[in-house]
Amino acid sequence: MFVLFTLRDTVPVAPKAFTVAPAITIQDSLNKKFANKLISDKGLALSVYDILTAEDGKVTWGNGMMYYRVSFRLMLFAPFVGEVIVGKVLDVTASYIRVSLDFFQDIYIPPTLLPPNSAYDPSQKGWFWYSDDEDRILTPSELLNTVVASRLYIDKGEPIRFRVDSVEWQDIRPEPPSSNAGAGAQVNGDADEQADVEQAKKDPIEKAGYKVIGTIAESGLGVVSWWDGGGGDGEFLEEGGEEE
């Protein structure tokens, strides 16, 4: 789930920070630049793990900045396909179940990757799983006619165990303003405000540049409390690799 990724970069240090140890200012600058940023086709950068090398700083003419050429390792969140992770249910809609790991919230479980005999209950606005003793596969209408007390609902805030089915990247670019150039200032202001509202209403799965698709359609996966011995948040004890 976590890997180390080696990078090289040039770090500028302002004159006002010359009294601070270079190792501290360099690491702070790198964290400001990379922390919580996506590294294309690699993963989500969390923080600088360590600094491997740092060349002597050089001052360039004009701004008085000291520039250090450094190599360092970033800790990335980069789950691999097939990995089992425990998170918490953040949101439930008819289109997906959204899972959060606190530091990362773009994890989605679509209906096709739910266990057999799962259905969406419009009255409860949530998905449930019906465990049939005879292992029958019921239709959605039959599932909605089952006894409510026999359904296992997937509620917000519940710890959930899932397996990574795929990892998806998409290029997200800012959308151009929708207001007409010839319209008055007030009209433009109203249009911009409306565009902001529409952007806020946009489905988070469409805004995610990096998302993890999970599955719970296997024995032992799903809400932790469904299974014997379930409970608690679980712990991540995964080993990460290092990439150059």
Image: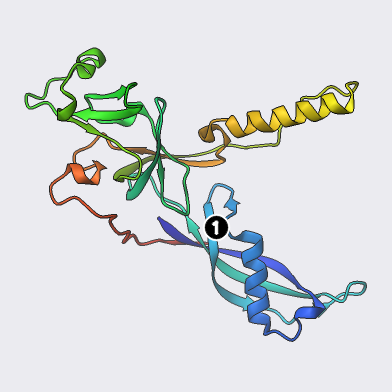
Tell me what residue is drawn at x 31 percent, y 43 percent: 162
Which residue is identified by label 1? 45
Element assignment for label 1: strand
Q: Residue 98 placed where, x, y %? A: 41, 38
Query: In this view of the protein, which residue sits in the foreground, 146 or 139?
Result: 146
Mark 1 surroundings: few (<14), some (14-19) or many (≥20) residues within 10 A: many
The amino acid type found where label 1 is placed reads: Ala
Q: Is residue 118 visible?
A: yes
Q: Residue 130 placed where, x, y %? A: 18, 27
Q: Quadrant of the C terminus?
A: bottom right
Q: Is residue 82 above or below residue 44?
A: above
Tell me what residue is drawn at x 32 percent, y 31 percent: 113
Tell me what residue is drawn at x 74 percent, y 86 percent: 19
Judged left or right of residue 91, residue 172 is: right
Judged left or right of residue 78, residue 150 is: left
Tell me what residue is drawn at x 20 percent, y 14 percent: 142
Q: Is residue 12 above or below residue 120?
A: below
Judged left or right of residue 158, residue 30 is: right
To which quarter of the image does residue 70 belong?
Answer: bottom right
